[in-house]
């Protein structure tokens, strides 16, 4: 049961909320993801139908705002158990739908601004009630999403705001992982290092507006310190020695940190800001290698909490993870080596295949569990906890 299921109206009203909102919002997030992946394949040269030529630039906003934004804000709304918080996933889902169905601008960007503003308000509430470093980190991530969306709605090109979106997803995930390190009790110096890394990321993204290349390098330096911190202190270093679901989640997390570290090195080394193959490699390492690994790892925990249905762990979940890492490797080689540029298209195709296979594995795991299944309801030691207050 979600932490908010027995407050603010009781369990009965919470079940009504689940039936009313959760399934349509999940469906809207999946629509944004599916169309975003479709547009990504088109951008790589695959011959697929394109409803409108101006949709090609919507690949990033759909994946970040329509898909990730809806999922993250939905989790926040469930965690905080405040009726007004549901405005965030509703607005984000509507923003994604507006982009998919061609509603004239600025409807889509403005809906994402609303969603990120509500998520920011959620975390302000959380920080006021629980002033901790992990809640402040996630608040910083929400502010970065809001700032990036405001810039995009104001007419800035997507490549000029994408680093704000990178900070949003990375800081959100880092804050969630930091919350779990409480069981390991990191020393004060480790907490200071974490806070400094977050501050460097925020300062670097802000500096991009003044000196783009230098700002990207500073951002990359902050991301690298943050990645090394997570790789050193995350409970996944211990849970990977266990078995079943717990080990699977740890493998997802630790392998994702490898891609985030690579993206950080690319940022520091090149300062890549404007569109190009190096810039693409940086983005793919973050959003595909790191973020999708995190999604694969957290989904077996988050989806049962969101849907209210148990999910049985299956070793087959390693298959889409393996396809994902293979595909990201292909794509980055194609980005960085001109003679192998054709590998980018194949990497993109395998990216899409990994998500499709993962969706199939999860759908199968939602079958009614048998008595001996390793059934997932909650497992806070294995993955991200409920981030509500």
Image: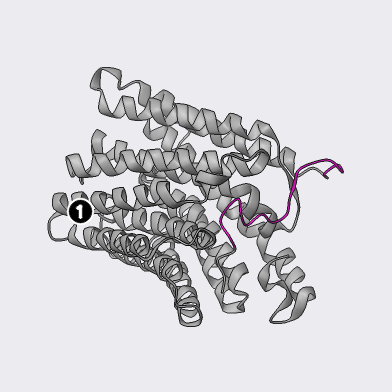
Task: Name the residue located 25 percent from the left edge and 60 percent from the top edge.
Answer: 200
* Picture quadrant where residue 189 is located: bottom left
Quarter of the image that includes the N terminus: bottom right
Quarter of the image that includes the C terminus: bottom right
Horizontal side, residue 168 vs residue 8: left or right = left
Q: Position of residue 370 (x, y in %)?
A: 86, 42
Task: Name the residue located 30 percent from the left edge and 38 percent from the top edge.
Answer: 280
Q: Position of residue 69 (x, y in %)?
A: 48, 58
Given the current orientation, which residue lies at the most extreme top position?
A: 339
Using the rendered image of the protein, determine whether residue 52 is visible from the camera's viewpoint.
no
Q: Which residue is mark 1?
A: 218
Q: Nearer the viewer, residue 257 or 323?
A: 257
Q: Nearer the viewer, residue 385 or 229?
A: 229
Q: Is residue 373 magenta?
A: yes
Task: Name the residue located 47 percent from the left edge and 73 percent from the top edge.
Answer: 123
Horizontal side, residue 199 vs residue 367: left or right = left
Q: Position of residue 47 (x, y in %)?
A: 44, 26
Q: Position of residue 382 (x, y in %)?
A: 60, 50
The magenta stretch is: 369-385
Is 212 drawn above or below residue 287 in the view shown? below
Q: Nearer the viewer, residue 185 or 206?
A: 185
């Amino acid at each position: 049961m979600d932490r908010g299921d027995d407050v603010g109206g009781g369990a009965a009203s919470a079940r009504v909320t689940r039936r009313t909102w959760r399934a349509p919002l999940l469906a809207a997030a999946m629509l944004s993801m599916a169309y975003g992946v479709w547009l990504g394949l088109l951008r790589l040269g695959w011959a697929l139908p394109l409803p409108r030529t101006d949709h090609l630039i919507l690949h990033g906003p759909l994946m970040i705002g329509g898909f990730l934004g809806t999922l993250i804000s939905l989790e926040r709304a469930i965690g905080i158990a405040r009726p007004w918080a549901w405005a965030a996933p509703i607005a984000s889902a509507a923003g994604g739908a507006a982009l998919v169905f061609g509603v004239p601008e600025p409807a889509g960007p403005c809906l994402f601004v609303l969603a990120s503003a509500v998520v920011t308000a959620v975390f302000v509430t959380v920080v006021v009630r629980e002033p901790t470093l992990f809640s402040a980190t996630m608040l910083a991530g929400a502010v970065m999403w809001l700032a990036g969306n405001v810039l995009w709605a104001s007419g800035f090109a997507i490549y000029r705001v994408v680093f704000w979106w990178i900070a949003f997803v990375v800081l959100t995930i880092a804050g969630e992982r930091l919350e779990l390190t409480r069981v390991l009790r990191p020393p004060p110096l480790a907490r200071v290092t974490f806070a400094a890394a977050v501050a460097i990321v925020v300062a670097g993204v802000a500096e991009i507006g003044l000196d783009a290349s230098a700002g990207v390098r500073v951002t990359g330096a902050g991301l690298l310190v943050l990645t090394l911190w997570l790789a050193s202190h995350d409970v996944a270093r211990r849970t990977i020695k266990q078995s079943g679901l717990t080990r699977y989640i740890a493998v997802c997390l630790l392998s994702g940190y490898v891609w985030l570290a690579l993206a950080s090195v690319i940022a520091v080394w090149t300062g890549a800001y404007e569109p190009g193959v190096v810039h693409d490699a940086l983005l793919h390492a973050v959003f595909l290698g790191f973020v999708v690994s995190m999604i694969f790892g957290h989904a077996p925990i988050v989806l049962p909490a969101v849907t209210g249905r148990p999910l049985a762990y299956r070793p087959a979940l390693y298959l889409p993870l393996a396809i994902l890492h293979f595909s990201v490797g292909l794509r980055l080689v194609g980005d960085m080596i001109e003679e192998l540029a054709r590998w980018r298209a194949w990497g993109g195709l395998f990216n899409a295949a990994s998500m499709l296979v993962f969706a199939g594995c999860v759908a199968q795991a939602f079958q009614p569990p048998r008595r001996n299944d390793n059934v997932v309801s909650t497992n806070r030691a294995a993955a991200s906890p409920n981030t509500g207050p």
